[in-house]
Image: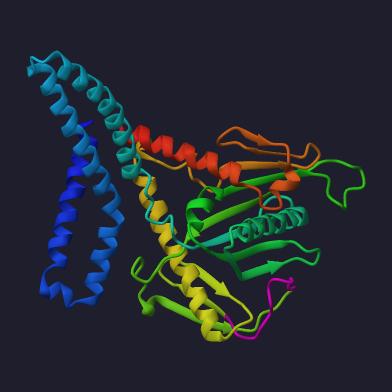
Amino acid sequence: MPTMFTRLESIVQRFREIDNLLAQPEIAADHEQIQELSKERASIETIVRLYDRYQDIHKQRIEADTIILDSTDEDIKVLAQEERENLIKQEANMEQEVLISLVSKDPNDNKDVIVEIRAGAGGDEAALFAGDLYRMYARYAQNKSWHVDVIDGNATVIGGFKEIVFEVRGQGAFSRLKHESGVHRVQRVPATETGGRIHTSTATVAVLPEAEEVDVYIDPNDLRIDIFHSGGHGGQNVQKVATAVRITHIPSGIVATCQDERSQLKNKQRAMGVLRARFLDAETTKKQAELAADRKSQVGTGDRSEKVRTYNYPQNRVTDHRISITSHSLDRVLTGEIDDFIDNLSAQEQAKKLQAALK
């Protein structure tokens, strides 16, 4: 596995470089650089420690091989052979552990997220389904003791949402929710359907990692900021206030709005957070599109036009099309019990990354 070990040696070398830099007085006086170097060091320390343990076991196995070849004492050879067999197992386990640590880390995994749900095909029924998805994710977040804040929403009279944007804050939020992006489809009989016919509607979900200012630079001169009074129908989770903020990034056309019930300053800060997340997502999507197909590590295509899951009410069934897993507990899924899907999607992502790393 020469590619893996080449990468590992490069990481170890960088780890040592960082330690040397942190020991330099001129670096110690630069608080910002200290923070950046310490963060980078922490991100690779686990890999370095695991690789050190692997190398120790590998060295012991080589020593056992030498004893078996060179010793004339049969008893010592027997003991060395037993030790060698044990070390071979340890070495294989450690190699796998090192490989997993090398490929599984997504730099965004521990970030908070911005979730955007939009009604798709199906009119009012699609808007109702968008509301169902919002409540599903809100309950999932509650089960994880995460915090949910609605940033913006366009509610309908009958209780759904044409669009709702909310923030989820909590440890590992992006790592758990990142595979929810895509087209979600619902099959059910709408309350307004007198003939009992099953209708199919859709809603799109986008999960964006929150971006810090250091992740994305946006020139303030490229922004147009509008302050306006909110209008339209409000839901119980979206308060209408006179301090709504809309920020437009003029060169890209990306727009973010926040009409929370708090101050204009707070709305502006949160709208900027959404803008940065969308800006980073656009850049990330562009880079991913440039990668060769066999280098991609996303589950499915990662395209938001991809149908990812179907919620069938008559059969009380939910099917994830990317991993071919079906749950016959739709009612429980809608109360936030989606860990089974997420665990399997994460496992598939891990398997694809391992396969790519072994090439």
Q: Overall secondary structure of the magenta stretch?
A: loop
In the image, taking residue 344 as reference, residue 212 lies left or right, namely: left
Image coords of residue 260 (percent x, y): 62, 77
Image coords of residue 243 (percent x, y): 60, 85
Q: Going by the picture, which residue comes out furthest to the right?
A: 194
Q: Residue 102: which quarter of the image?
A: top left
Image coords of residue 34 (percent x, y): 23, 70
Image quarter in which the N terminus is found: top left
Image quarter in which the C terminus is found: top left
Residue ID at (27%, 70%): 35
91 is within the stretch colored magenta? no
In the image, taking residue 33 as reference, residue 275 lies left or right, namely: right
Image coords of residue 339 (percent x, y): 59, 46
Number of numbered discs present?
0
Q: Residue 222: which quarter of the image?
A: bottom left
Q: Residue 258: which quarter of the image?
A: bottom right
Q: Nearer the viewer, residue 288 or 222?
A: 288
Q: Is residue 97 above or below residue 89?
A: below
Q: Nearer the viewer, residue 209 or 33?
A: 33
Q: How is the image coloured?
A: rainbow
Residue 158 visible from this viewpoint = yes
242 is within the stretch colored magenta? yes
Residue ID at (11%, 70%): 24
Residue 359 visible from this viewpoint = no
Residue ID at (70%, 78%): 231
Q: Is residue 259 above or below residue 19?
A: below
Q: Is residue 319 above or below residue 14?
A: above
Residue ID at (17%, 16%): 75
Q: From which residue to which does the magenta span run?
A: 233-244
